[in-house]
Structures are given as C-alpha cells and as structure tokens.
Image (spheres, rainbow, N blue to C red):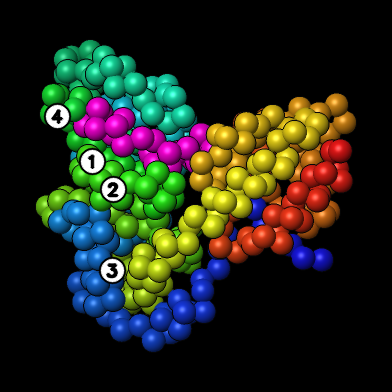
Amino acid sequence: MMISDFRSDTVTKPTPEMRKAMAEAEVGDDVIGFDPTAQKLEALAAATMGKEAGLFCPSGTMGNSIAVKAWTRELQEVIVESRSHIFNLESTHLTFVSRVTPRPLPSRRGAMDPGEVERNVRKPNVHTPQTSLICLENTHNNWGGAVVPLENFKAIRGVADRHELKVHLDGARLFNASTASGVPVMDYAREVDSVMFCLSKGLSAPIGSMLVGPAEFIDYGRRIRKALGGGMRQVGVIAAAGLLALTEMSKRLSEDHGRAKRLAMAISALPGVVLDPFDVETNIIIFGFDHPKYSVFDLLAELEKRGIRALAAPGGSGIRMVTHKDVGDADVDSAIGAFREILA
C-alpha cells in the first residue's frame, strides 16, 4: 500500500542532488572555524536576508534559543504571540535557557495588534521585569500556516524602535510566507534584528536551520551554540544540502501551497470537518473535527488504514496536515478519496 505522509514537512527526504553534494562536500572543523562549505552557507544565508552574518544551527529551536539568549538578560521579559511556536513548542527554552519571562499576547492569525504590544512594554522596576525583546513568527504554524502581513511587521518595528527593543523573527517557514505573499524574504528581514529560518521542512534539507543578524550578535551566538552543545565538526556534509535547499528548493513552494488548497477545498464540506478553505494560505491545513461516530483519533486511525498519515492538531480537537515536496497530486487524490470514503 502506498503511504502518503501529511504529518509534517519535516518528513521530507533529501533530493538526489543533495545526497550527491553531501557525499562530495569539502569539509573542515567548523568549531574552530575551518569548514568551507559551512562558511559558504552562512554567508549565503546572511546575504539572502540582508544581514551581516549567519550561523548554522542543528535545529530551529536551537536557533531561536540562541537569539533569545543573545538579546536578553535574566530577569527580563519577552513579548510573544500566545500560540507561537517559540512559546508553546520549544521545550520552555525561554525560561530554561534564557531565564526570561514570556508575555504572551493574542493575535489575529498570528499578527499581534501593535497597540496591544506597546501597552505591554514594561520598564524596569523592583516589582516587574523589563521588556527587552519581541518575537514574531512567519508563517505562523499554529494558525495553520497563516502569513503575517509585512505592514504588521513594520508597525511592530515602530513600537520596538520607540522603546529601544530588539525584534527576533522565527521564520522557520519564511520562504513559504514570501511565496504566498509575493514579499521578498529580505523585506520581512529588514524589519527585524535577527531571523531564524529552517533549511529542512519545505526546503527539504535533512538537517539544519540558519540564524542571521548583526556580526557581533552572531559572534556571541556562536559561543552560545557551543555552550548548548551545537558545535559540530565536519558540518559541511549537511551544509552542502543546505546550500541546495536555499538556492533551489525555495522556488517550488507554490506547488505545495496549491496542493494544500485543493485538499482543503475538497474536504471542507464533509461531515464533521470544520474548515474554511480560504484560510489555507500556504502548506499547512489545521481543521476542527466534530463527528457523531468518529473522534479525532478514530479518524486518524481510519486514515492510516488507507495509507494516509496525519497528526492531531495541538490540543487534540482537530487535525493537522502539511503538504511538501514528497506529497504529489496522487497523494492528494488518495487523501481526498480516503476522507470521502470514511465521512461521506
């Protein structure tokens, strides 16, 4: 039976070209600064985002952890969106690694109200922590891959400038946001002080994320990466795949978006599915499920029997499906057929 894996774009396999580049990569010891392929990737990542320097990280969570640690001090506070990945799904590194207090704020599909952000900026006193950083996310994972508009970035940048705050972007899927909106990634990056973006997920590299920002910030971030255990030796063997992810795979993301939209349109009217397909902007579909016969986990089990893999959405009240390069038109057709067979 053919398996169609919609669990996440993290399940993508490296392309044949990536595997060849990894096998042939020129390598050195990156911890002591002599891996030429890693250095090439870091320079390209920085240039792509219009920043001074870049740092290869084993994961997006480590990249975000380094950024928060570098921009803050203990006893300070970080403004985050209430459903953000950095607040909900990164193993509490805000408090564990950086020892800062998160201040979660509500949003409209990931876009926090700039006025609300400004009202929650706190100055230091003996009772309360000082706000030092604002964290944004684009696309927004838990809002179903929603694209946060550039205008919202600019407004929050204005708040940050008025209060001398730094802004960090969790741009794990920033290239998806750029593809969907038509806004170049550099335009988003211009409104923030640092950016983390993933080479895995939609860009299909097997491992790795990039952190970019000012040179002094990245120099300090390299020390933090070492302290967190993220310094690796001949990292060029995976950086080589990252170069192809960045230069080639970002060009095909519209295919994933189109397939996600087609799947959403097809299942949205089925019994139990609670989904507005027009909310699906990129490659993530998150929908509620309320059916008299099936629970969320019953439906997932029935889909699995038919070769369709998906995940429960956060909280278990719905289902999350993600399209990516290893999900083609035939996989979408199979998923639509399985949903209709089970629910119609």
Q: In this view, does 190 lie above or below 6?
A: above
Query: Which image quadrant for residue 165?
Result: top left
Q: What stretch is highlighted in magenta?
A: 137-157
Q: In this view, does 131 lie to the left or right of 86?
A: left
Q: State the residue position of label 2.
A: 195
The answer to whether residue 42 is magenta is: no
Q: Is residue 88 left or right of residue 121?
A: right
* Residue 340, image x, y percentages: 83, 44
Q: Residue at x 55, y 55 (%)?
A: 256
Separation of marks 3 and 4 at Cα, in angstroms = 30 Å
The residue under label 3 is which amino acid type?
Answer: Leu
Separation of marks 1 and 3 at Cα, in angstroms = 21 Å
Question: For residue 41, which numbered disc appears in the image?
Answer: 3
Q: Does label 4 or label 1 sit earlier along the sequence?
A: 4
Q: Does label 1 or label 3 sit earlier along the sequence?
A: 3
Q: Residue at x 75, y 33 (%)?
A: 269
Separation of marks 2 and 1 at Cα, in angstroms = 7 Å
Mark 2–mark 1 contact, CB under 8 Å?
yes
Circle 4 SS class:
helix
Q: State the residue position of label 1.
A: 192
Separation of marks 4 and 1 at Cα, in angstroms = 10 Å
Q: In this view, does 49 lie above or below 126?
A: below
Residue 224 shows in this picture: no
* Residue 188, image x, y percentages: 28, 43
* Residue 128, image x, y percentages: 24, 16
**Crowd class of label 3 (few under 14; some 14 to 19; many from 20; radius 10 Å):** many
